Amino acid sequence: MKYTVLTLFPEIIDAYFANSIMARAVKRGIVAYQALNIRDFAHDRHHTCDDAPYGGGAGMLMMAEPLGLALQSLGIVNRLDAGRESGDALSPTAALPPTVALSPSAARRVLYLSPGGRPFDQALARELAGENELVLICGRYEGIDQRIIDGFVDEELSVGDYVLSSGEVAALSVIDATYRLLEEVITPGSLAEESFSGGLLEYPQYTRPEKYATIAVPELLLSGHHEHIRRWRLRKRVEKTLRVRPDLIRKGLDTGIFDREICALIEELQDKPEKAGHSEGEA
Ligand code: SAM
């Protein structure tokens, strides 16, 4: 998987790729990335990338031209230009700085991170993890010129119903949620029962010491009885999902993804609020 990030702050992206599991994935060749500095594609003396919006209003907007040139340097065609004569404002390719060459046939998705986009969730993370390359455009200020969205972007993605000051953190969320789903990055077992797999949240987990601040680990987890532990964990997943994310339960029921055991637990637990505290060791 290759990630190409268009940003005014490549150092934020570089720092993320240089650390921890991601750094290892890059070293092992499972993941490749480049952070393109949009400012390198602004050719005035001050490398200006923003201007006031037409029609007035607060704040500045990222200009179309530097972003368009950055995208074209990757071989991405402006749909609005297709079939038109060259020589307009967005196609002076001779002025482009060098970037990593890409096969034009490579399967890639051009995504603009935006609070107005399609909600990004685990299902979409799984889908995007199947692409060869994700090109992620990070906005700043009041966002980007609409003509870039209309001309180049395949999809706008939102990481939540709140407004961040810039797209870098959102792009890194998409990168982080997708690369860990690639084969060989994380052991498949870790992914199998984590939150959102099978439409449920994760069960509570404990590690040493057995007693912390007078609270003991549920006894059943120390029993070594695998079937009891499995049932306890499943029950906890259903309990928590019912309490915190009833929308996931409704969705799972509507789409028929829950097996008989989960449906029975839902029926049993839905009118019964989860007990507080940590004494539940029941099977
Ligand atoms: N004026 C924009 C609006 O009202 O939709 C908000 C612009 S925001 C201050 C600046 C940039 O942060 C956006 O262009 C986008 O790239 C990023 N951003 C902010 N919130 C986001 C979210 N929830 N999901 C994805 N990107 C977000």
Image (spheres, grey):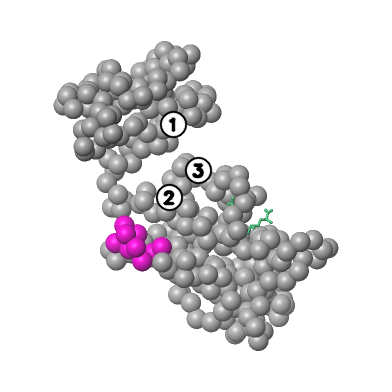
* Disc 1 from disc 3: Cα separation: 12 Å
In the picture, measured across the screen, residue 278 lies left or right of residue 105, that is left
In percent of the image, x 57 and y 51: which residue is there? 157
- Bin the neighbour count of mark 1 within 10 Å (Cα to Cα): few under 14, some 14-19, many 20 and up: many
For the record, the magenta segment spans 16-24
Q: Amino acid at mark 3?
A: Asp
**Residue of label 2:** 177
**Label ID, residue 199:** 1
Give the quarter of the figure containing the C terminus. Answer: top left
At mark 1, the secondary structure is helix
Q: Where is residue 70 drawn, in percent x and y?
A: 58, 73
In percent of the image, x 23 and y 32: which residue is there? 211
* Disc 2 from disc 3: Cα separation: 9 Å
In percent of the image, x 34 and y 59: which residue is there? 22
**Residue of label 3:** 121
- Bin the neighbour count of mark 3 within 10 Å (Cα to Cα): few under 14, some 14-19, many 20 and up: some
Q: Where is residue 72 drawn, in percent x and y?
A: 58, 72
Q: Amino acid at mark 1?
A: Gly
* Disc 1 from disc 2: Cα separation: 16 Å
